[in-house]
Each structure stands twice: as C-alpha cells, then as structure tokens.
Image: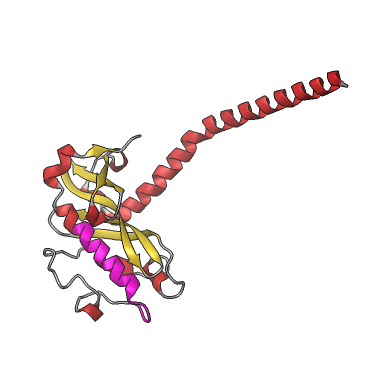
Amino acid sequence: MLKTIQKHGITLALFAAGATGTTAIINALTKSTIDMQSAKQQMALFDQVMPADRYNNDLLKNCFIVNAPPLGKGEHKIYIALKDNAPQGVVMKTTAPDGYSGAIQLLVGADFAGTVLGARVTEHHETPGLGDKIELRLSDWITHFTGKVIHGAGDTHWAVKKDGGDFDPFTGATITPRAVVNAVKRAGLYAQTLPPQINQLTPCEE
C-alpha cells in the first residue's frame, strides 16, 4: 500500500514538473510575439494623438515616469517625441478624476507651444448611451480637440458651452465632457512646462 502511494506520488510529481516545464517553454516562445503585438497596438493609438510627421524616434523607448498633479494622482507615463533628436511634443497618459461614473483614462498628444495634437479615451465607466460618447467608436466628439490651442490657464474657450466655452456637451450629459475637456486642458498646459525638465526626467523601467 505504501509503495503504491509512493509510486503515485512520484508520478504526480513528475507530471506536475513536466506541465510546469511545458508552460514555461510556451511562455518563453510566445512572450516576444505577445510583446510585439502589444507594442503595435500601443503605437497605433499613439499615431492617433501624435502625427507621424512630427517625430522620427521610437516613442515607446523614449518613455518617462512623472509625478505630475496636472495629469492626476500618482505616477503617469509620458513619451517624448523627437525629430532629429530635437524635442517636438509629448504623448501623455492622464486621468480625468471627475467623470460621472468615476475616473476617465486618456491619452493626450501635445506640442510644447500650447497646441493639442490629439486625445483619445483609453478607459472609462461612463453611462452607456450618454457619457460613453467620449469613445471614438461611438462619436467623433473626442476628435474636436485636435489642433486646438490653449492660451494659458485662464483660456475660457477651454470649457463646455454650458460653462461659456467652445466644446459641445452631450444631450443629457454635461459632467462627462466637462471632465474630459478639463483633463485635456491640464495635460496641454503641463506639456508647455516640459522642455526645461526633459533632461531630468526619470526613464520608464523596461
């Protein structure tokens, strides 16, 4: 009886070790492919907020970690766009903390002179049929930031029309677009402060 139990135990141990080894091999073989696909998806999104003719460096490799209150609480990643090694603009991951149903995550591209080059929502929990119109697949509203210039923190154009600004709200929903407009404005203003800091930024860990 004891020998039988020991035999089964050894068999199970060998099976477990074999399964673990197989899993490790599969992970090793597929990791590079998964990483490559992830990078392609991220760059496709970057291209929507930072025109390709604005830079010729690898944005993903020019990533930095910042603690910048204008982008939201905690750490955020930013990516500096260079053309022939000269800084041209930045892609920023930023947060609108005051959405109707919680925080809204965005990707914002801007140059250093106050022009927003593009914005996209990457994550939200807004109400379907109302606040979710911030998604590009449901509405082109988010594209209206492209090319808009921020003339300082007191620029009253950067608000929804209900607050005296230029941006349309959604029918039945003002909180969501207001949160996004304010977040994009804060990110664009932060971009203008970056040039003197670029050489002191902390690179992202690979």
Residue lying furthest top in this view?
3
Residue shown at the point (28%, 71%) measured from the top left: 178
Is residue 178 found inside the magenta-colored segment of the image? yes
Q: Position of residue 203 (x, y in %)?
A: 26, 37
Vertical relation: 180 (above or below) 45? below
Which image quadrant is residue 205 in? top left
Q: Observer-nearest residue: 141 or 84?
A: 141
Left or right side of 30 for 201: left
Q: Nearer the viewer, residue 48 or 77?
A: 77
Looking at this rendering, what residue extends furthest in the front direction? 2
Q: What residue lies at 58% left-to-right and 32% top-to-bottom?
A: 26
Residue stretch in magenta:
170-188
Q: Is residue 127 magenta?
A: no
| Residue 206 position in % (x across, y down) | 35, 34
Q: Residue 197's spot in the image, x, y percent?
A: 14, 43
Is residue 136 among the parts visible in the rendering? no
